[in-house]
Image: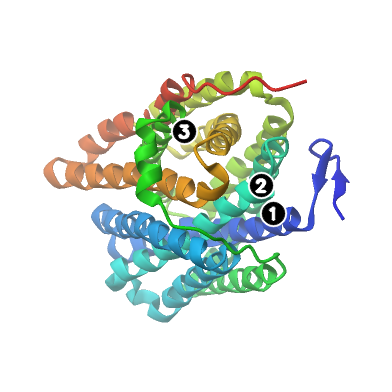
Amino acid sequence: MAKKFKFLGDVELTKDLSLLLIIGGLYSLSVALSNTFVNIYLWKQTGKYSDLALYNLAVVVLQPLTFILAGRWAKKIDRVIVLRIGVIFLALFYLTVLITGTKAADFLLLLGGLLGIGYGFYWLAYNVLTFEITEPETRDFFNGFLGILSSFGGMIGPIAAGIIITRFEKFTGYTIVFGISLALFAIAVFMSFSLKPRPAHGDYCFTRIFEERRKNENWRLVTNAHFFQGLREGTFLFVISVFVYISTGSEMALGTYGLLNSGISFIAYFLASRLIKKNFRKKAILIGGLLLYAAVILIVWEVTYAKLLIYAGIIAIAYPLLLVPYISTTYDVIGLGWKAAEMRIEYIVVREIFLNIGRVVSILAFLLAITLFNEEKSIPILLLVLGAGHTLIYYFMKKVQLPLPTR
């Protein structure tokens, strides 16, 4: 039986909704513990931006390809099984990192590929389950509360990982941290067995929903927005952590950065999920996008740890402002789309394709810039260009027209 949950509003909290939030929380904690430090782990082995870019490129290339396959499997088998496969591949990624150890840099494409496959299966299933389990009335709550869990994990994870890594010699601390992440994903697999099976029926019409962009203006705008979201994310996901490490030479400093970012984000997600109503969504997206670009301008020249901490605080406020209404609007557009009930998986796949195309373009541009030009001069200019991605989201989302909410 569903229970009322008043912490983030008067919401019906069902068993599946609770389980989905717990699995999302475990995922967030594991990622917060390790993902940032994987980039530093590889950086310490190679010291090359190009190697980090290739590793992350493998992730964002394999992820959309896996999304297409995962979508077919979710339509023919079961979304919960697809979620489980994703978590298993993520666990395999950390297992491979542990096995390869100090030679992990020799297996950049393999590691990136495993992570990309894991992300593809996990996020396809998680997004589809989110769409199915939540309703328009509960989506802001779900996205906001998931953001709170992510922020809470982000507070605990980086600082705990920083303490562990700095207390042990050489790479021993990294081995412990990656082992903990592996254990968390194992728990997530176990939790997934409690989710109600959700088999799907019907044909897999990926190309038909891709073509729907020509007929559905809202859908075209949303997918375009996701391309520009990916344009910023592709490079920023790994460059900022390297900046923090280079400016301090300390994993503990990176943990402190993550603690500050997630601590502020925790409060911001709580407030965003409570205060941002449907009629304020577009303004919130605009404000969030502008703040994110202002943060980029702050750090592109003369990078210091103090500036990076200010950057962490700004984006911690900006992301909830942008993402809570942005994600909710996206799901509302999908919910009103052609044969949404039958084609929800295809809509999620196409959305993720555009997001990851943006990420691929971003990382390829980064590789091109550091190959053809001086790194110190080209990276700041590139970040100014790519950093506008989230700001440009508003240009598309402001044109999305949804029915007015009924009283």
Q: Are marks 2 and 1 in contact (CB under 8 Å)?
A: yes
Can you identify the residue that label 1 sits on? Answer: 21
Q: Residue at x 35, y 64 (%)?
A: 112
Q: Are marks 1 and 3 in contact (CB under 8 Å)?
A: no
- Could you say which is closer to the camera, residue 132 or residue 310? 132
Could you say which quadrant of the image residue 180 lies in? bottom right
Give the answer, above or below, for where 193 lies relative to 19.
below
Give the answer, above or below, for where 404 lies relative to 190.
above
Could you say which quadrant of the image residue 84 lies in? bottom right
- Could you say which is closer to the camera, residue 41 or residue 117? 117
What is the CA distance from the residue labelled 2 to the residue labelled 1? 6 Å
The answer to whether any part of residue 40 appears in the image is no
| Label 3 CA crowd tier, 10 Å (few <14, some 14–19, many 20+) | some
- The amino acid on which the numbered mark 3 sits, given as a three-letter code, is Lys
Q: Describe residue 57's horizontal placement relative to residue 241 as left or right.
A: left
| Label 1 CA crowd tier, 10 Å (few <14, some 14–19, many 20+) | many
Q: Describe residue 267's horizontal placement relative to residue 1 as left or right.
A: left
- Could you say which is closer to the camera, residue 202 or residue 155? 202
Can you identify the residue that label 3 sits on? Answer: 307
- The amino acid on which the numbered mark 2 sits, given as a three-letter code, is Leu
Q: Position of residue 20 (x, y in %)?
A: 68, 56
Element type where label 1 sits in the image: helix
Q: Position of residue 122 (x, y in %)?
A: 52, 60
